[in-house]
């Protein structure tokens, strides 16, 4: 049976969904890990699995794989004295189950969803506006996460925790080769070539050569984006064309590790000496520290061209309230208490089970676990260069079109101008359809 879905794999899944392989709202490189049993389990207190007013709140979480997480959320729920909260631990395909449950009277009152609710949930009136609940602390949350859960000027979810992807490098190998940590895409390509030996490749992006995880970073680092402020496609620029052409040159250079025993979300390629640099996620830091000690550093995806900036993808589960909750106001009050008022619970949730960043900047700054070394460097990268993995209006159809084009550009060397022009037409139609 595949392992339960932990937060690292959530962001990994998000990467895939960002490229269109998962449904809207469930984006990332999530492997099939959360499949398995069906139904809910692990109630924190007596209660039913469905909406249940009269002072009782049903709260759904996906089945986290990190030890202690279930007990922690049960403890938080038990501490709430305004209502009886029943925590439901949902194994299997959480996104599909929760989306289906919202259509019935037996769904949750409060539930988490990857990067907040989908645009379809919002447009269908399945979730309620949480603007007032987060208002007092909104500016303290990671801006990229707030942008991702905001539509039509309203906030539809409260971010629970921040995860991110980043570039990891071996300090000793770069120093031995006389190479500074790369600050531009051209420097990264040159470093990968210089660091490649008979036994070690210079760079590992993924077993797909980065085609499955680096679409967004190429856009942002080239000064572009998926959509602009008017929700129009914003990725057909000369700098983006150049960025994907450079990624193809890496794919064929011989300095890129392909076919690693474990893919990018696992740090074993760099810890086993198969590569000198690797694209991976924040969740790998404890393993990296155990294996490499201080012999590694972290970087954002480097900028491409004079108009570009470094970039890192960030993601988070967001806490939502169902419009079918028996007592919507009680559910909204509980969400505010847990994810806005209870700072100690928020810090505990982010830093005590796995390796993550609190969704609130003030908590990230004071968290002892994140106060020094690569952890502190990672927090700064999130605040300086963080981008939500995809915009809310980026539908599965848009993602599929973009993903297919990126794969052809990176692996086959297809023309970026031709490929992205076709994607632009598809995305424009999708945005028009969604906005009605």
Image (cartoon, helix red, strand yellow):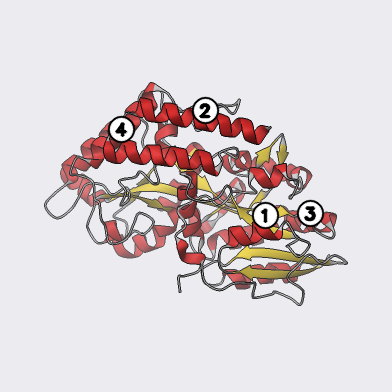
Q: Label 1 near label 4: C-beta < 8 Å?
A: no
- Mark 2 to mark 4: distance in Å? 20 Å
Q: Is residue 246 left or right of residue 146?
A: left
The single residue placed furthest to the right in the displayed view is 54
The location of residue 13, given as percent across then percent down, is: 48, 54
Q: Is residue 158 above or below residue 247?
A: below
- Mark 3 to mark 4: distance in Å? 49 Å
Q: Nearer the viewer, mark 3 or mark 4?
A: 4
The location of residue 128, given as percent across then percent down, is: 76, 48
The structure residue drawn at horizontal position 28% and vertical position 58%, both measured from the top left corner, is 269
Q: Label 2 near label 3: C-beta < 8 Å?
A: no
- Mark 3 to mark 1: distance in Å? 10 Å
Q: Nearer the viewer, mark 2 or mark 4?
A: 4
The location of residue 103, given as percent across then percent down, is: 73, 56
Q: Which residue is mark 3?
A: 332
Q: Label 2 near label 1: C-beta < 8 Å?
A: no
Mark 3 or mark 1, which has the lower sequence index? 1
- Mark 3 to mark 2: distance in Å? 35 Å
Residue 303 lies in what quarter of the image? top left
The structure residue drawn at horizontal position 74% and vertical position 50%, both measured from the top left corner, is 126
> Circle 3 sits in a helix, a strand or a loop, which is it?
helix
Q: Label 4 near label 3: C-beta < 8 Å?
A: no
Q: Is residue 342 above or below residue 243?
A: below
Q: Which residue is mark 1?
A: 319
Mark 1 or mark 2, which has the lower sequence index? 2
Q: Which residue is mark 2?
A: 233
- Mark 4 to mark 1: distance in Å? 41 Å
């Amino acid at each position: 049976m595949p392992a339960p879905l932990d937060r690292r794999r959530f962001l990994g899944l998000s990467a895939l969904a960002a490229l269109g392989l998962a449904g809207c709202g469930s984006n990332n490189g999530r492997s099939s890990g959360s499949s398995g049993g069906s139904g809910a389990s692990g109630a924190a207190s007596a209660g039913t699995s469905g909406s249940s007013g009269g002072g009782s709140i049903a709260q759904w979480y996906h089945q986290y794989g990190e030890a202690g997480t279930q007990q922690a959320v049960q403890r938080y729920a038990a501490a709430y004295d305004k209502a009886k909260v029943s925590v439901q631990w949902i194994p299997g395909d959480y996104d599909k189950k929760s989306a289906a449950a919202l259509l019935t009277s037996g769904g949750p009152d409060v539930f988490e969803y990857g990067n907040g609710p989908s645009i379809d949930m919002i447009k269908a009136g399945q979730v309620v506006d949480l603007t007032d609940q987060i208002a007092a602390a909104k500016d303290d949350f990671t801006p990229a996460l707030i942008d991702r859960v905001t539509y039509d000027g309203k906030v539809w979810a409260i971010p629970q925790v921040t995860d991110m992807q980043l570039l990891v490098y071996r300090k000793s190998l770069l120093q031995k080769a006389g190479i500074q940590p790369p600050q531009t895409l051209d420097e990264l390509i040159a470093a990968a070539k210089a660091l490649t030996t008979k036994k070690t490749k210079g760079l590992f992006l993924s077993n797909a050569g980065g085609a499955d995880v680096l679409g967004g970073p190429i856009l942002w680092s080239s000064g572009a984006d998926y959509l602009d402020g008017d929700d129009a496609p914003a990725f057909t620029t000369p700098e983006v064309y150049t960025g994907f052409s450079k990624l193809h040159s890496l794919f064929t250079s011989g300095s890129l590790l392909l076919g690693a025993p474990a893919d990018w979300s696992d740090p074993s390629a760099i810890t086993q000496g198969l590569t000198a640099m690797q694209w991976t996620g924040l969740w790998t830091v404890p393993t990296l520290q155990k294996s490499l000690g201080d012999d590694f550093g972290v970087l954002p995806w480097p900028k491409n061209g004079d108009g570009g900036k470094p970039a890192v993808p960030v993601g988070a589960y967001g806490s939502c309230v169902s419009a079918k909750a028996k007592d919507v106001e009680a559910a909204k009050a509980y969400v505010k208490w847990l994810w806005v008022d209870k700072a100690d619970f928020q810090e505990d949730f982010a830093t005590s089970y796995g390796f993550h960043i609190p969704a609130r900047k003030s908590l990230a700054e004071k968290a002892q676990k994140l106060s020094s070394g690569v952890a502190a460097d990672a927090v700064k990268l999130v605040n300086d260069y963080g981008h939500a993995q995809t915009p809310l209006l980026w539908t599965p159809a848009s993602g599929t079109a973009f993903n297919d084009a990126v794969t052809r550009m990176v692996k086959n060397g297809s023309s970026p101008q031709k490929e992205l022009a076709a994607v632009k037409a598809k995305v424009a139609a999708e945005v028009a359809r969604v906005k009605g």
